[in-house]
Image (cartoon, rainbow, N blue to C red):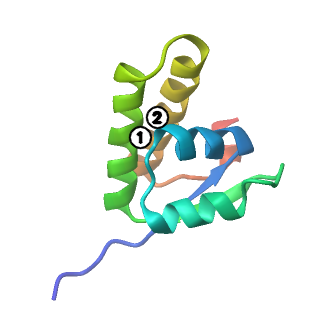
Amino acid sequence: MAKSEPDIEIELWPRERELILEYGYPFSDAKEQLKAAVSSDDISVLTISDFYLNQMIGDLCYSINKRTKGRIQDELLELCDRLESIQRYGEGELEYWE
């Protein structure tokens, strides 16, 4: 039996959660986690597998290239850069990014 990768924990600001919900086409588990925190102004943690994170990054990239312009596109680019780095290095805490 193949060994599964551990899930990745990603701290997200409220605006990042909104962007993922609208432009990232999250799978059901991630969508439930994001929706549960949607009314909070606090940082929340999204726990996601590497596979689904990769899919979400691809969907965000699609939205960057095909669905958005201007400020939204810039916000998505910044979010995508952070998510790609988290995927590569495994560091999902926001203080790492400050």
Task: Judge left or right: residue 43 versus residue 25.
Answer: right
Task: Judge left or right: residue 16 versus residue 49.
Answer: right
> Residue 38, percent across and down?
72, 54
Is 31 located above or below residue 6 in the figure?
above
Residue 8 appears in the figure: no
Residue at x-position 40% and y-position 73%: 6
Residue at x-position 42% and y-position 60%: 27
State which quadrant residue 10 falls in: bottom right
Residue at x-position 35% and y-position 20%: 65
Residue type at numbered disc 1: Glu
List the single residue furthest toward the top. Answer: 70
Residue 19 appears in the figure: yes
Residue 80, numbered label: 2
Residue 84, numbered label: 1
Is 89 located above or below residue 44 in the figure?
above
Q: Secondary structure at mark 2?
A: helix
Residue type at numbered disc 2: Cys
> Residue 28, percent across and down?
46, 65
> Residue 42, percent across and down?
82, 52
Pick the quarter of the image with the N terminus.
bottom left
Is 45 located above or below residue 72 in the figure?
below
> Residue 84, percent across and down?
41, 40
Q: Identify which residue, 97 or 15, lies in the foreground.
A: 15
Task: Judge left or right: residue 97 versus residue 61.
Answer: right
Task: Judge left or right: residue 51 versus residue 29.
Answer: left
Pick the quarter of the image with the C terminus.
top right
For label 2, the crowd category at 10 Å Cα-Cα, with few meaning under 14, some 14 to 19 and many 20 or more, is many
Q: Are marks 1 and 2 in contact (CB under 8 Å)?
A: yes
Q: Secondary structure at mark 1?
A: helix
